[in-house]
Amino acid sequence: MAAPDHPRRDPRREQAPAPPEFTRAVAQLHAATTRPEVLVEQMPAPQRIAPHAAALSADVVVDGEETGSGRLVLLHDPAGNDAWDGTFRCVAYARAEIDPELVQDPVLAEVGWSWLVEALDAHGAAYSAPSGSVTCVASQGFGGMAEEPQTAQLEIRASWSPTGDITPHVEAWSELLCTAVGLPPVPEGVAVMPSRRAHRGPA
């Protein structure tokens, strides 16, 4: 009797086992502490950019209203990547609702980028090869939507190659989200209590 047919495995679709350094980095990713306004969850990571990846999403909620959101993806290629200047890469996105009048500020984009750099430095997150862009968008309704209030968003897209512990990079990204939506800094010496949703895996 002929053996039953079985679907052929495509080796290109099978992900290699995670190396110890990536497993350790993912544990550090989830060990970060964020402010209670920042609700962080694990999300599916892109599979085609690097051999190994992990990702987080976040919403910033103030007084029950979402004022910002973001994503952070950690990529790892054990073989290294010349463009990364290393074997790890952080890819971050942050979006915040802002006052429409701020869109006209010619230095807003530069200030938005400085928030990321300052957050990384403040948390002692060592990195190299930073790259990114800052976009300011205003939206105004017309016709049947003329009564809708004008809105504006600030979007920051960035990537950098982390060195050492990944935890401070997550906390810097979280701080970037808070700064972008206008939350005041946590006073020095005050403990940060993470939100209930922080780093909860998908259901």
Image: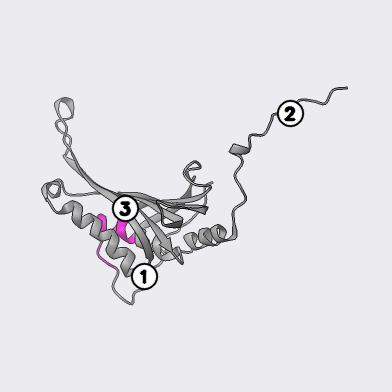
The answer to whether any part of residue 81 appears in the image is yes
Q: Position of residue 96 (x, y in %)?
A: 27, 49
**Residue type for callout 3:** Ser
Q: Which residue is mark 2?
A: 6
Report if the CB atoms under discs 3 and 1 are less than 8 Å apart: no
Q: Secondary structure at mark 1?
A: loop
Residue 5 sits in quarter: top right
Image position of 142 (left or right of 87): left
**Residue type for callout 2:** His
Residue 62 sits in quarter: bottom left
Q: Secondary structure at mark 3?
A: strand
Residue that appears at 36% across and 70% down: 124
Residue that appears at 45% across and 63% down: 166
Question: In the rendering, which numbered label is found on residue 131?
Answer: 3
Q: Residue furthest bottom?
A: 189
Q: Which residues are magenta?
A: 175-185
Q: Which residue is mark 1?
A: 124
Report if the CB atoms under discs 1 and 2 are less than 8 Å apart: no
Question: In the rendering, which numbered label is found on residue 136?
Answer: none
Q: Secondary structure at mark 2?
A: loop
Q: Kindly report the distance in space between the C-alpha atoms of the residues bearing marks 2 and 3.
A: 46 Å
Q: Kindly report the distance in space between the C-alpha atoms of the residues bearing marks 1 and 2.
A: 52 Å
Q: Position of residue 86 (x, y in %)?
A: 45, 58
